[in-house]
Image: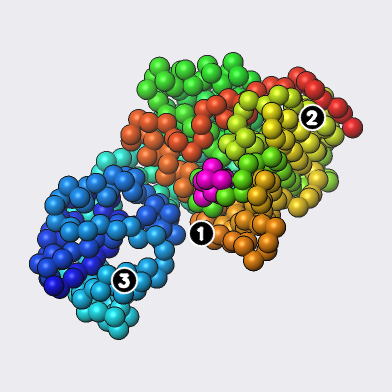
Amino acid sequence: MKKVITYGTYDMIHYGHIRLLERAKALGDYLIVGVTADDFDKTRGKINVHQSLSERIEAIRATGIADEIIVEEYEGQKIDDIRKYDIDIFTVGSDWKGHFDYLNAYCKVVYLERTEGISSSEIREKKRSVKLGIVGNDKYLNKVFTETEFVNGITVSGICSDNPVNLSKIVNKAPVVTESYDEILELSDAVYIHSIPNLHYEQVKKALLKGKHVLCESPIAYNKQQYLELFDLAKEKGLILTEALRTAYSTAYHRLQLLVSAGKIGEVVSVDAVCTSLLDEVKKDKEYLKKEWSSITAWGPTALLPVFQILGTDYKDIRFVTNFIDEEIDFDGFTNISLIYPKAVASVKVGNGVKSEGQLIISGTNGYIFVPAPWWKTDYFEIRYENPTENKRYFYQLDGEGIRYELADFIKSIESGKDSLFIDKEVSLEIANVMDMFVGHKNMTII
């Protein structure tokens, strides 16, 4: 029996896919189809995959062409599979011609001509044409603008900023650069908001009332009431409102959560997260600080994310210890947040004006997870045990600090009409509640 193997993403399967599979099957007697896993696709730069792995596998199964379906999860797996399944022929589309010649050492390699005029990328591009307005006043907009180029289906409609001096020459090439939020809303289907936090609630509300989808940097609101009002409004209008916390979308962070859930370190008893950055000493006057992110707004949501996603939001007590640079405008240079759960504790340290080692440590009854600085954009973490020979290291590629994954998920949510699964609403709601307690100086010691 002659065995044939081929691989692909098979997103939104179409006639071109089916013709290629039929021709692959005709090369032998038994066809194995490898479907690439979501994480592996990310490492290859394919972040615009529309369907989940299970949906793509089911679509291949429904064609009735494949005799066996496997999942491709890592670089170098093709050689392992050829050996494991005793493969005679490896085949793939001609657009990869020459790329897999090295496999001739293991089996025959055949490149098949693809069906002209059809591809998953073209189908995805036709399905969506989201005009995105980018709103804010700092250099971070440059990163967002650049990352949109890696996400199919996004066209930047313009930039709204009252401080264009922070925008690079690349961003100034946007179709429109304006200080008018109303103008950007008129030009856009959706907006990404990264303005100072005290503007978020009003800007999000205005966008939703005008029928625009919103991706807003966390915190979306300063209290539960505002948060619930905005999400109820989005639901009423049939719009997507998503909290922008790029850490939640990184492969390493997501895999870390799964390992914790699977009990790899036993029962979690402590989560310790540190996020800090420095301020320019000469710019600490009140007018400058009014346009700057404080410690709690710049880093609080990120540092609280693993606490609430791992330990939940049902804590028994919360305490703040804060050092204010300017107490009148609630600009903290450093804040320590301590949370007590029924069977665990958490410590969050955030600073914008203080520098420390930005690491994440999750302690369990069997071991602990160590994520080195800067943990919020990591591509690497370790599980450490009492016996160091049992320690394991995990590496996952992270491109664009996770911004492009965040944008791709936002587009997918708009297309499907379903909220993102990366950040639960209960987590977002509790982040808003913590902001409310901080502004009200509840359970706070000022040092």
The residue range painted magenta reads 253-263
What residue is at 66 percent from the left and 51 percent from the top? Answer: 367
For the residue labelled by badge 3, is the local secondary structure a helix, a strand or a loop? helix
Whole-percent x and y of residue 103? 30, 78
Q: Is residue 159 left or right of residue 131?
A: right
What residue is at 42 percent from the left and 44 percent from the top? Answer: 408
Amino acid type, callout 1: Gln
Crowd tier of the residue under label 3, counting other residues whose Cα lies within 10 Å: few below 14, some 14–19, many 20 or above: few
Asked whether 255 falls inside the magenta stretch, the response is yes
Q: Tell me the number on the disc at residue 397.
A: 1
Q: Earlier in the sequence, mark 1 or mark 3?
A: 3
Above or below, 183 relative to 109: above
Q: Is residue 437 left or right of residue 427?
A: right
Q: Earlier in the sequence, mark 2 or mark 1?
A: 2
Whole-percent x and y of residue 275? 71, 45
Above or below, 316 relative to 280: above
Where is mark 3, residue-wise? Answer: 84
Colour mode of the rendering: rainbow
Q: Tell me the number on the disc at residue 351.
A: none
Above or below, 315 relative to 363: above
Where is mark 2, residue-wise? Answer: 320
What residue is at 28 percent from the left and 44 percent from the top? Answer: 55
| Depth check, front residue: 5 or 196 | 5
Q: Earlier in the sequence, mark 2 or mark 3?
A: 3
